[in-house]
Image (cartoon, grey):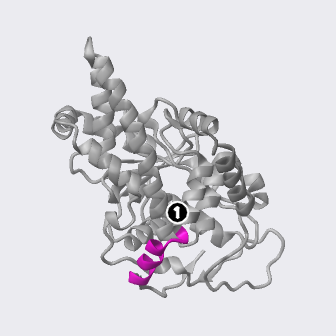
Amino acid sequence: MASVPLSSLSLAHRRRPADAALTFSSSDLSFRSGSVGFGLAKKNQRVRVSVCRASSFVFRNLDADDFRHPLDKQNTLILRAIPGLNELGKALLGSVTEQIMLLENIGTSVLVSKNQLSELHQLMTEAAQILNMEAPDLYVRQSPVPNAYTLAISGKKPFVVLHTSLVELLTRKGVAGLDLYIYLGKHAVLAHELGHLKCDHGVWLTFANILTLGAYTVPGLGWLIARNLEEQLFRWLRSAELTCDRAALLVAQDPKVVISVLMKLAGGSPSIADQLNVDAFLEQARSYDRASSSSMGLYIRNAQTRELSHPLPVLRAREIDEWSRSLGYQQLLKRAIQSTTPHDV
């Protein structure tokens, strides 16, 4: 059995629950928070910045339900109500499957540590501290598809896999002034994956994937059961991604960082990162809402998204923008404990 990416950062996929993904971009040049000092720099010289920023807040008593999206709560309850789902998933995911997944990843990826890709290691450690959770192992894997995903099986230590093309998408070498924004963008990507672990999404996704695949092989009612479960699974997947976007915001603590990651995944590349505009992308999201507000528009919208593993990028951008201005988000920030340790980026 091949490894099953339980969650990821890339754009929405059709009929591929195992490839669920989330993607982030970093592009907008405005800094809403933080104290940044810039010295004079030569052309193409990388500027190192020491910054005390809002995302150094640590949520000591953060619970998953503190930021879980309402649709995630609703659809998780529906999944839990499916008789035998949890037991069947545990039975199907045995030690052999776990070993295959683990060895495949170790054999084809680079394990991040203090001595290997130390900047990514620091980002993962900081993001986990902010979200009040243990940091999983982090691997970087060669792939042309910008993506990141999480694996968590049967109580084993989970791990996150980050594709090299996603790292490149979030990197703009030699552009003075972008270093902090790029730093926060990578932080947001890792925080999104941590959100899946914080909310136990990985286990549910694995169970549901295997149950769906197994049901399709059962004659008669098996296909109908699988079809209904698959639709519910995709509905849950889309809502789970909205929750993890919130986790990304809790770490980055600037909605433009998270939205710019989504924007870059929708239509960005390293060469045009500094030309993308978050405000224009949000206006694009509002125009989509207006265009789909009629009865026919709503029908087309539902048909368009029903088989997607992730919400449309513009809808995710709008959701995170709205939550960043909500009372619930502001109350979470008031509960946080601030750390003033500067980070060199």
Q: Identify which residue is drawn at 33% across, 41% down.
A: 205
Please tell me which residue lies in front, 12 or 103. Answer: 12
Image coords of residue 338 (percent x, y): 44, 85
Is 80 above or below relative to 181? above
Please tell me which residue lies in front, 36 or 14. Answer: 14
Please tell me which residue lies in front, 88 or 319. Answer: 319
Tell me, yes or no, if residue 66 can be seen here: yes
Please tell me which residue lies in front, 152 or 192. Answer: 192
Q: Identify which residue is drawn at 61% across, 57% down.
A: 261
Image coords of residue 215 (percent x, y): 28, 22
> Where does label 1 land, which residue?
188
- Where is residue 257, by image quadrant? bottom right
- Where is residue 199, by image quadrant? bottom left
Amino acid type of the residue tagged 1 in the rendering: Ala
Image coords of residue 122 (percent x, y): 46, 69
Q: Is residue 218 left or right of residue 24?
A: left
* Callout 1 crowding tier (Cα within 10 Å): few <14, some 14–19, many ≥20: many
Magenta range: 324-335
> Can residue 318 be found in the magenta stretch?
no
- Please name the predominant secondary structure of the magenta segment in the image: helix
Q: Identify which residue is drawn at 75% across, 65% down.
A: 174
- Which structural element holds mark 1? helix
State the residue lying farthest toward the front: 295
Q: The C terminus appears in which quarter of the rendering?
A: bottom right
Q: Is residue 270 left or right of residue 229?
A: right
